[in-house]
Each structure stands twice: as structure tokens, then as C-alpha cells.
Amino acid sequence: MPLGSYTGDRMAERPRVVSTNPVKWDIYLAHPAPAKLLGAVEAVSERAAIVKAAKEFKQNQAKLIAVRRR
């Protein structure tokens, strides 16, 4: 069997565990370099944070970056 052709369960991708607890995300406008901090939102995922921030800050979703606060 050639390397990389194994498709058994061991090679299957594990599903990502998504928390139902919202966390804080810093939202950056990525278009101008360097990125500009717009603010913070609470959301359960990066995608949800970008969608929420786009509405809150009236920006295009494609131009936003969400970074989880630690």
C-alpha cells in the first residue's frame, strides 16, 4: 500500500470541539497595514465574532480579523 493512501479511522480528522461559552475576541481591521484594532466582542467562535463585529463596527467581514484574548 503506497504511503498516504490509508483512509481508515485513524487518519480521519477529529471534529473540533466548540465551546458554548462566549469568549472575548479582539477585532482588527486588516486592510491598512499594520492592522488597526477596532474593539472587542464576545462570541463562541472566531467566525461568529467576525460576523458580530461586522454588524457592530459597520465593516466588511472580509476585512476583519478576530484574535482570541488570553
Image (cartoon, rainbow, N blue to C red):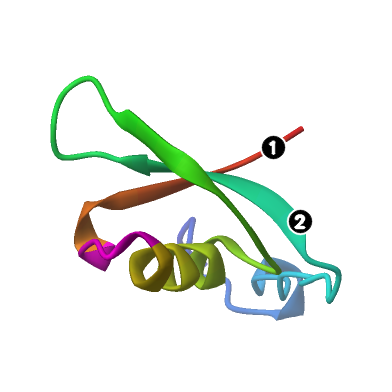
| Amino acid type, residue under disc 2 in the picture | Val
Asked whether residue 68 is drawn in magenta, I would say no
- Marks 2 and 1 in Cβ contact (< 8 Å): yes
43 above or below 66? below
Looking at the image, residue 54 sits to the left or right of residue 14; the answer is left
> On the image, numbered disc 1 is attached to which residue?
69
Is 7 in front, or is 59?
Answer: 59
Q: Residue at x 35, y 59 (%)?
A: 57
Looking at the image, residue 69 sits to the left or right of residue 61; the answer is right
| Amino acid type, residue under disc 1 in the picture | Arg
Asked whether residue 58 is drawn in magenta, I would say yes
> On the image, numbered disc 2 is attached to which residue?
23
Q: Secondary structure at mark 2?
A: strand
Horizontal and vertical percent position of residue 12? 66, 74
Horizontal and vertical percent position of residue 23? 76, 56
Residue at the extreme top: 34
Number of residues whose C-alpha sits closer than 10 Å to that of mark 2, classed few (under 14), some (14–19) or many (20 or more): some
Looking at the image, residue 25 sits to the left or right of residue 18; the answer is left
Mark with earlier residue (2, 1): 2
- Bounds of the magenta span? 57-61
Horizontal and vertical percent position of residue 50? 43, 63
Q: Quadrant of the C terminus?
A: top right
68 above or below 15? above
Q: Secondary structure at mark 1?
A: loop
Q: Main secondary structure of the magenta part?
A: loop
Number of residues whose C-alpha sits closer than 10 Å to that of mark 1, classed few (under 14), some (14–19) or many (20 or more): few
Q: Residue at x 73, y 71 (%)?
A: 14
Looking at the image, residue 1 sits to the left or right of residue 36; the answer is right
Place residue 26 in its image quadrant: top right
CA separation, marks 2 and 1?
Answer: 8 Å
